[in-house]
Image: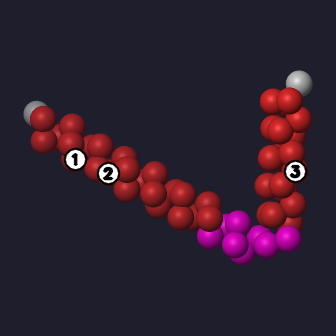
Amino acid sequence: MLKKVLTWLAVAFVVFYVIQRPEDAAGIVRSAGAALGDAAASLSAFVGSLV
């Protein structure tokens, strides 16, 4: 029950943040995407160096 309540609170906070500060929210998503892309490139380079 507590997990469900905390999940809904987190979702509500994200929606509120996106509505209140859409530019900042977009920046966070952009930064997270760039970080995931960098991680994928690093993993690819590692696997490539093993071959």
Secondary structure under tag 2 reads helix
Q: Where's the N terminus, which quadrant?
A: top right
Query: At label 3, which amino acid type do we have?
Result: Ala
Query: At label 2, which amino acid type do we have?
Result: Ala
Q: Residue at x 81, y 64 (%)?
A: 17
- Categorize mark 2 by other alpha carbons within 10 Å: few (<14), some (14-19), many (20+): few
The disc placed on residue 19 is none
Q: Are marks 1 and 2 in contact (CB under 8 Å)?
A: yes
- Examine the structure image and report whether residue 43 is included in the region drawn in magenta: no
Say which residue label 2 marks: 41
Left or right: where 17 falls relative to 46: right
Left or right: where 17 falls relative to 34: right
Which residues lie in the magenta part?
20-27
**Numbered disc total:** 3
- Categorize mark 3 by other alpha carbons within 10 Å: few (<14), some (14-19), many (20+): few
The image quadrant of residue 7 is top right
Q: Residue at x 37, y 47 (%)?
A: 40
Q: Report, in whole angstroms, how far the alpha carbon at label 3 lies from the one at label 2.
A: 33 Å
The disc placed on residue 45 is 1
The x and y percentages for residue 42 are 29, 50
The x and y percentages for residue 21 are 79, 72
Left or right: where 13 falls relative to 46: right
